[in-house]
Image (cartoon, rainbow, N blue to C red):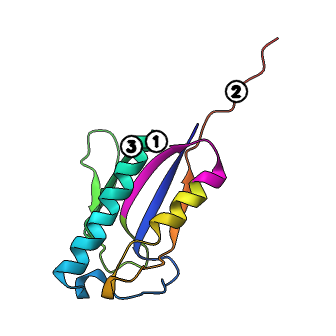
Amino acid sequence: MAKYLLLKHYRGAPASVNDVPMDQWTPEEVSAHMQYMRDFAARLEGTGEFVDGQALSPEGTFVRYDGEGRPPVTDGPFAETKDLIAGWMVIDVETYERALELAGELSAAPGAGGKPIHEWLEVRPFYAEQPTATE
């Protein structure tokens, strides 16, 4: 099994087919979208492929270390940034092809008008240590 991160973007990915921002959806459209996401996660829990997932707020802060004994440096929020992550899901699947298949299904979540968004999802494998040969 290999873990993959599926990233949903507010902005930064290529435009989706149904490219109406969520803040312009009706409450019913938002509810339908969230229910699709919950149902998708529940189905993957049943197959043992779901690890975790969360929606993210558009606001955030960048933080970095600024030296021993000094407070961290912060900057933000950066809601106006080009790349903005809307949420993520971690899956644990047998193959890369299965990760792509599931990302494609997740891309079909409904949006404005109840029609599939056809949004782009970023599929990122978890970095794993390569086994070392022992003799």
The image quadrant of residue 104 is bottom right
User: Dot 3: within a 10 Å radius of its alpha carbon, few (fewer than 14), some, or many (20 or more) residues?
Assistant: some
Residue that appears at 60% across and 37% down = 128
- In the rendered structure, the answer to whether residue 117 lies left or right of residue 21 reads right
Asked whether, in this view, residue 32 is left or right of residue 19, the answer is left
In terms of sequence position, does the residue under pointer 2 or pointer 3 come before the other?
Answer: 3
Residue located 20% across and 85% down the image: 26
Residue type at the position of mark 1: Thr
**Residue 75 visible, this angle:** no
Helix, strand or loop at disc 3? helix
Magenta part of the protein: which range?
87-98
Quadrant housing residue 50:
top left
Q: Secondary structure at mark 2?
A: loop
Q: Nearer the viewer, mark 2 or mark 3?
A: 3
Secondary structure of the residue carrying numbered label 1 = helix
Please tell me whether residue 80 is drawn above or below residue 103 in the rendered image: below
Please name the residue that numbered disc 2 is placed on. Answer: 131
What number is the disc on residue 47?
Answer: 1
Q: Position of residue 72 (x, y in %)?
A: 28, 50
Kindly indicate whether the residue at mark 1 contacts the one at mark 3 (C-beta within 8 angstroms).
yes
Query: Cα distance, mark 2 to mark 1?
Result: 27 Å
Q: How busy is the neighbourhood of tag 1: few (under 14 within 10 Å), some, or many (20 plus)?
A: few
Residue at image position (27%, 64%) is 35
Residue at x 48% of width, y 83% of height: 16
In the displayed structure, does residue 112 sit left or right of residue 27? Answer: right
- Residue 130: percent from the left, percent from the top? 69, 32
